Image (tube, rainbow, N blue to C red):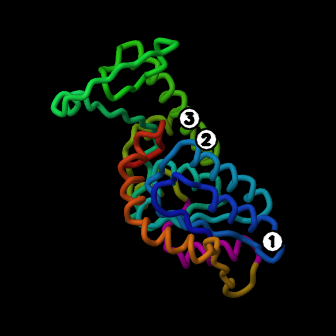
Amino acid sequence: MVRIEGVIADNKEIIEQIDELADEDDIRAVVLRIDSPGGGVAASQEIYQAVRKLQTRKKVIVSMGSVAASGGYLIATAADRIVANPGTITGSISAVMHFADVQELMKKVGVRSSVIKSGKFKDIGSPARDMTDEEKRLIQEIVDDIYDQFVRTVSEDRKIPLEKIKSLADGRIFSGRQALQLKLVDELGGLQDAVLIAGRLAGIEGKPAVVYTEKKKTGLWRYLIESTTSAISGEIRKSTVESRGVQYLFQ
């Protein structure tokens, strides 16, 4: 069992866990427990690719927790089957990019910004000035292209016509029960149901034995540093994650 939880930003450990399980001959199937609103586009795509590679070697089942939306849902589509709770929040098939505008704040504190650049788009998205119409069009084209990648992936993996997916992919969310009706998930159930399904698809007789992946162990000094800074870094991540490029993120 691999857990994908929280906003998807740093995917290194998750991918390492997935790759290690792919090489374990005594592991017959893998359950991904997804409880995530999504996150960075590249991070989500890289986990998706790792799951797709794993799925060529073992049965992969997704169990959706409270939320498995946007980038979290993208990852789920790489699995053989998707199991959602009736009340799981899923969907949010869309892309978003945020830009802050701090001009009024700068005026209040008496701060000015000067920029010297080599090209007219070099400081695109600067929080110190309004975005031009040309810049907005450029950013919109990028978001639209990434959105197109998302909907095409869902259409291919779920075997749903592209136009049907596009009619659902406007950022809206669904309950697990609604998602089942729309064929975005395969069946309703909890984590243990997903484990039993994984065992059945892998040809395991009786109740499957579950192996839980663990976080990498760290040294004492690193552990102490991480423990004392976890709350601060968590808040920083929450406040900055939306500003780092395009996001597959349900907000």
Name which of mark 2 and mark 1 comes first in the sequence.
Answer: 1
Q: Is mark 3 on a helix, strand or loop?
A: helix
Q: Is residue 23 left or right of residue 195?
A: right
Name which of mark 3 and mark 2 comes first in the sequence.
Answer: 2
Tell me where the magenta segment starts and ends, as one range.
186-203
Rounded to the nearest angstrom, the CA distance separating label 1 from label 3 is 36 Å
For this rendering, which residue is in front, 215 or 181? 215
Q: What element carries label 2?
A: helix
Q: Residue furthest right?
A: 25
Helix, strand or loop for the magenta stretch, by majority: helix
Q: Where is residue 123 in the image (x, y as percent from the top left)?
A: 44, 22
Residue 217 covered by magenta stretch:
no
Query: Which residue corresponds to mark 3?
Result: 162
Q: Is mark 1 on a helix, strand or loop?
A: loop
Q: Which residue lies furthest to the left in this view?
A: 108
Asked which quadrant contains residue 203, the reply is: bottom right
Asked which quadrant contains residue 23, the reply is: bottom right
Q: Nearer the viewer, mark 2 or mark 1?
A: 1
Query: Which residue corresponds to mark 1?
Result: 24
Q: Position of residue 163 (x, y in %)?
A: 51, 33
CB atoms at circles 1 and 3 under 8 Å apart?
Answer: no
